[in-house]
Amino acid sequence: MPDAVRPLIVANWKMHPLSMRAAGALFKKVVRGARGVRGIDIVIAPPVPFLGALQRAAGSVSLGAQDMFWERSGAYTGEISPAMLKDFGVRSCIIGHSERRRFLGETDEMINRKIKAAVQSGITPILAIGETERESHEVVPPTIAEELTRGLHGIAPRRLLGMAVAYEPVWAIGTGHPDTPDNATRRAIYIRKILVKLLGARVAGTIRILYGGSVNAKNAATFFSRDIRGIDGLLVGGASLDPEGFTRILQSVAGHRRRSAPR
Ligand code: PGA
């Protein structure tokens, strides 16, 4: 991976674990594991009810959220304001995860509003996109371009400096069957091309493209290419709930980065 790009590893805990006690214990272990790892940005996105207690223990990892609402306040039962997330010390937020698109009916238009609200509130969006099984063998799955174009519609490019895009083919999430590093890299290159077209080369160059879908300690480093700019980071679901395994993911990415740095 080109040396200038600092890898970003995001842990998406989804709806786990089931108690504050378990969340606190997991977080502590993750922070401890991250302590010796250099040169990587680490974000932990726990369920919202745990955010308040975890913010005190954040250490070298930063806190993320798994979703947020597009309004700052008002009569929106059950929703979470970006201002509330900020107050918890949250710096970034996954927006448009395929599970929300599928189970909660999130549309590209809703996702677009959330991204606008995130950047307005100073929260870095991590826009999740990805094709379904049907398109997985197409050279250029139309879903990728559509989700990107609609998700980022009408936002001034400079507001998107430093955001992230997570490429997560739906068929690879939680299945134990990840995409191949070659294919993920090809998709990352295609995504960056679209970003350049939408936002210009300068802003697109600051956007880290992550791969997500059945990442584990064994395959994590394989997604990073040594000589071209492809995948810049990972969005890790299931494997982020095992602190030892997650630490191994961090270590293997850091080790890969050291080996590929120019001498
Ligand atoms: P997984 O989930 O690592 O369990 O496949 C990734 C994600 O959905 O973010």
Image (cartoon, grey):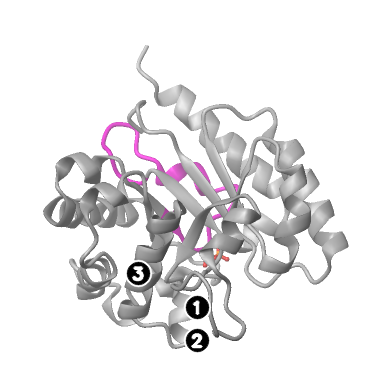
Q: Quadrant of the N terminus?
A: top left
Location of residue 157 in the rendering, given as x and y in whole percent from the top left corner: 22, 51
Does 202 lie within the magenta span? Answer: no
Comparing 33 with 75, the one in front is 75
Q: What are the residue bounds of the magenta stretch? A: 211-231
Location of residue 6 in the rendering, given as x and y in whole percent from the top left corner: 43, 33
Comparing 254 with 95, the one in front is 95
Instruction: Give the Cα distance between marks 1 and 3.
Output: 11 Å
Location of residue 252 in the rendering, given as x and y in whole percent from the top left corner: 56, 36
| Residue 52 occupies quadrant | bottom right
Q: Is mark 1 within 8 Å of ligand 1?
A: yes
Q: Is residue 100 above or below residue 157?
A: below
Furthest residue in direction right, as rendered = 21
Residue 168 in sight from this viewpoint: no
The residue that label 2 is drawn on is 104
- Looking at numbered disc 3 in the image, what kind of residue is underneath it? Gly
Q: Is residue 16 above or below residue 258?
A: below
The residue that label 1 is drawn on is 99
Q: Quadrant of ligand 1?
A: bottom right
Question: How many tags in the picture?
Answer: 3
The disc placed on residue 130 is: 3
Judge from the rendering whether residue 182 lies leftward or rightward of residue 15; answer left or right: left
Q: Main secondary structure of the magenta part?
A: loop
